[in-house]
Amino acid sequence: MTHDDNQLGSFLRSRRERVDAASAGVVDNTRRRVKGLRREELALLAGLSPSYYTRLEQGRDRRPSREILEALARVLRLDDTERAYLWSLAMPSLAPADSDALAVSTVRPGVLHLLERWTDLPAFVVAPNRDVLAGTALAARVNPAWSPGHNLIEFTFLDPRAQETYPDWNEIALQAVAGLRATVATRRTELDGFVAGMRKRSETFRALWDSHDVYERMTGDKRITVDGLGILRLSFESFALTGPEGHVLYVYFPHPGSTDDEALRGLA
């Protein structure tokens, strides 16, 4: 069975290996040679038989009940995003509705009008697969990836400019993949082909994807290297645009009164 054929088992194994056995209440006086919990330890903590959990992780049983999923999520200490992803793998019919058929690449006129008026901020709209659909003029000047026609994932992993643009490239790459996996939970049909393509085109993407990290950063900070300015330190907020398209608006801004603020104003 290939990795792609058993995504549920691969995800469970990756989370199991990250749980500290001692903090989970496992008493073991022997020298441990495994990362995290053993299969039988996780099974017992979740109230399952070890043989059943083994079948689940190996992909020989793919129909766990609600109660089993909740027990596993509790022991594995999954957060809300990871829990939603687990449900999307095990019980897709009960996960949030997949709106793939309704995916639209056209940004609403009102949103475009707002972007035209925001002359002093880098802001852009992305599709679920991270295609940049529209943005302010300043966004494209700050980061070449933030202009229409680019894809944030492809730029990060396939464009030679990415590691110069992002001084913290390793962290950004990890966050990009984890966020994409969170989106896949609700738009699997739409994104499976894109993920498969990236796995073939980038070994680094494949390795990060196979680590099964899943979380979303809705706000945060990022360092960007801008030609002629050096490194800008910008914060960002993200806003899900209501509708079936799954579009997200990102707005970047500097700390008021900082040297980054002055530099961005000059660039604008």
Image: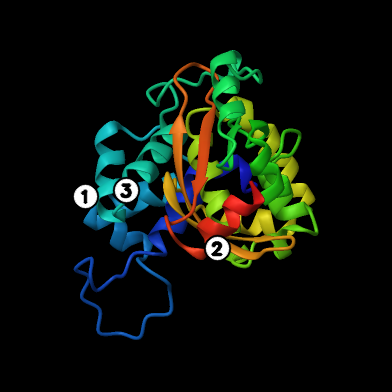
Answer whether labels 2 and 1 touch (C-beta < 8 Å).
no
Camera-side mark, 1 or 3: 3
Residue at image coords 31%, 55%: 76
Q: Which residue is mark 1?
A: 47
Relative placement, left or right, of 115 versus 19 is: right
In the image, what residue occupies the spot 74% across and 39% down?
150
Q: Is residue 59 among what the camera can see?
A: no
Q: Which residue is mark 2?
A: 171
168 lies above or below 13: below
Percent position of residue 141, x then y: 71, 47
Residue 17 is situated, as x and y percent measured from the top left of the image, at: 42, 64
| Disc 1 element | loop
**Residue appearing at x 34%, y 64% in the figure:** 19
Mark 2 neighbour density, 10 Å: few (under 14) some (14–19) many (20 or more): few
Which circle's residue, 2 or 1, is located before the other in the chain? 1
Q: Which mark is residue 79?
A: 3
- What amino acid does circle 3 point to? Asp
Q: Does residue 153 appear in this view?
A: yes
- The amino acid pointed to by label 1 is Gly
Height in image: 105 above or below 63?
above
Dot 2 amino acid type:
Glu
